[in-house]
Amino acid sequence: MPMMHAPLFESVQDLLLHRPPMLLLKSVLRWSESELEALVDPRDSHLFMDADGRIPAWVGIEYMAQAIGALAGIESRRAGQPVCLGFLLGTRRYHAELSHFDPVQELRVSVRELLRDETNLVLFKCEIHSGEQLLAHAEIKAIQPKDVEAVMAQFTQMNAV
């Protein structure tokens, strides 16, 4: 009889520290060692909706950041480690083809690792599609430090000055 293995994750909540209403990814569609594609239901972004019920295009950066976090969560789970905190350090060339996302259209967010250094600083190419249409794209730098507590202590010290 073949040995059964538990799945790596059951839902996107297993991969991120975010919880509703700040959990904006609906599910992970596919992933590999250096890339991930996730599904977003914009209606889950109700905290960001404007008075007309539309989601500003800048929220796309958070969709991308959470997809990066989900990929990092998969890496952690594959290594038998807990999901850890990461930091978005910067966004380059974020460009959206529209001013707002339509709350009724499903969005696919794809992230692909372009470069990683010895400090775990990573550059990602990110895109948001609806169907075959490219709606937004950017390059995002993120880091998942090995010692999050030390980084948080540094931030605390900087803010105390």
Image (cartoon, rainbow, N blue to C red):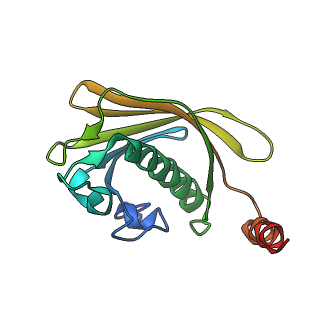
Is residue 64 at least partly visible in the picture?
A: yes
Choose between 44 and 157: the one closer to the eye. Answer: 157
Left or right, 95 with respect to 100, comes to right
What residue appears at the point 59 percent right and 69 percent down from the top-left corner? 82
Is residue 4 at least partly visible in the picture?
A: no
* Quadrant assignment, res 87: bottom right
State the image coordinates of residue 113 (x, y, percent, origin top left): 57, 35
Q: How many marks?
A: 0
Answer above or below: position of 90 versus 150.
Answer: above
State the image coordinates of residue 13 (x, y, percent, origin top left): 39, 66
Answer above or below: position of 74 versus 89.
Answer: below
Answer above or below: position of 69 versus 155.
Answer: above
State the image coordinates of residue 61 (x, y, percent, origin top left): 45, 44
Quadrant assignment for the N terminus: bottom left
From this viewpoint, which residue is outermost toward the left?
A: 104
What residue appears at the point 40 percent right and 71 percent down from the top-left corner? 19
Left or right, 48 with respect to 68, comes to left
State the image coordinates of residue 43 (x, y, percent, origin top left): 21, 56
Quadrant assignment for the C terminus: bottom right
From this viewpoint, which residue is outermost toward the front?
A: 51
Choose between 12 and 9: the one closer to the eye. Answer: 12
What residue appears at the point 82 percent right and 66 percent down from the top-left corner? 158
What residue appears at the point 32 percent right and 57 percent down from the top-left corner? 48
* Quadrant assignment, res 136: top left
